[in-house]
Image (spheres, helix red, strand yellow):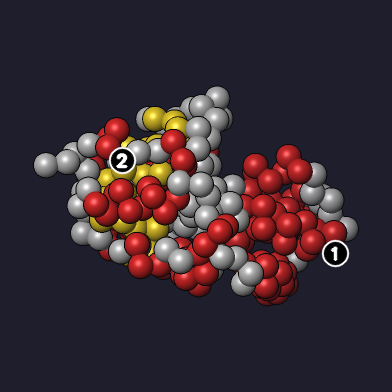
Amino acid sequence: MPRFDAVLFDLDGVLADTAHIHFAAWRRLGEELGIHLEPAFEEKLKGVDRMGSLELILAHGGPEGSVTRTAEEKRVLADRKNSYYTAAIAEQTPDDLLPGARRVLEEVRAAGLKIALASASRNAPPLLQQLGIASLIDAIADPAAVKAPKPAPDLFLEAARLVGAVPERCLGIEDSVAGIISIKDAGMVAVGIGDPTVLTSADYVVPTTEQFHIGDFL
């Protein structure tokens, strides 16, 4: 039997390159608020949920940026950013999958393992339909249904629960530092997609999704 029963995937940066769409929406909102977000700021938002990202951006605009706004004002700002993002992803197609992403999902299914999505994005279900891979995913963990976002382990634990897998027999795949911490704190094996000098706490690091093969881990 394989060592693993399930593979739990992040979405942005692992299956699809939508992180830049998120950041473009945040930059647009930032400019409207008079907050300039330099390109390097995108790394700080990887794996962070919507409200957490907004707090980081408001703080970037000045120490008073977050505390002077009410919870309702923050919700309105987050919803505005989300409207920019959803309009952009409506134009996504299967051609926007990262190289190798569909092949990876098909290999995992062929190996008899369950597949769950553990993405901080609340727009994941419609995006999976746009990308043409919804039928390859067994379950999607709802970030609104867990107590704490990444880097807490809650989202990955929920993804494992949805496919009936114990954490010790799950392989988590992420491209962000926060995501890797989430996987490790959930008691799972973590595979990082990206730079090993950044994803230092991952058990294994693969440069790109295209270079990931489930057979290497069975």
Residue extending farthest to the top is: 197
The foreground one among 24 and 145 is 24
The type of residue carrying mark 1 is Glu
**Are the two marked residues, 1 and 2, in contact with CB atoms closer than 8 angstroms?**
no
Q: Is residue 78 above or below residue 57?
A: below
Residue occupying image coordinates x 46% and y 41%: 210
Residue occupying image coordinates x 56% and y 59%: 95
Q: Secondary structure at mark 1?
A: helix
Mark number displayed over residue 214: 2
Q: Which residue is mark 1?
A: 32
Of pointers 1 and 2, the one earlier in the residue sequence: 1
Residue extending farthest to the left is: 1
Q: Secondary structure at mark 2?
A: helix
CA–CA distance in space, label 1 to label 2: 44 Å
Tell me the mark number nearer the camera, choosing from 1 and 2.
Answer: 2
Give how far across and how far down residue 197 sits, in percent: 55, 25
Q: Would residue 78 be visible to someone looking at this image?
A: no
The type of residue carrying mark 2 is Ile
The foreground one among 56 and 16 is 16
Give how far across and how far down residue 140 sits, in percent: 38, 64
Residue occupying image coordinates x 67% and y 72%: 87
Q: Would residue 83 be visible to someone looking at this image?
A: yes
Q: Is residue 33 above or below residue 182?
A: below
Q: Is residue 90 left or right of residue 152?
A: right
Residue occupying image coordinates x 39% and y 58%: 117
The foreground one among 14 and 73 is 14
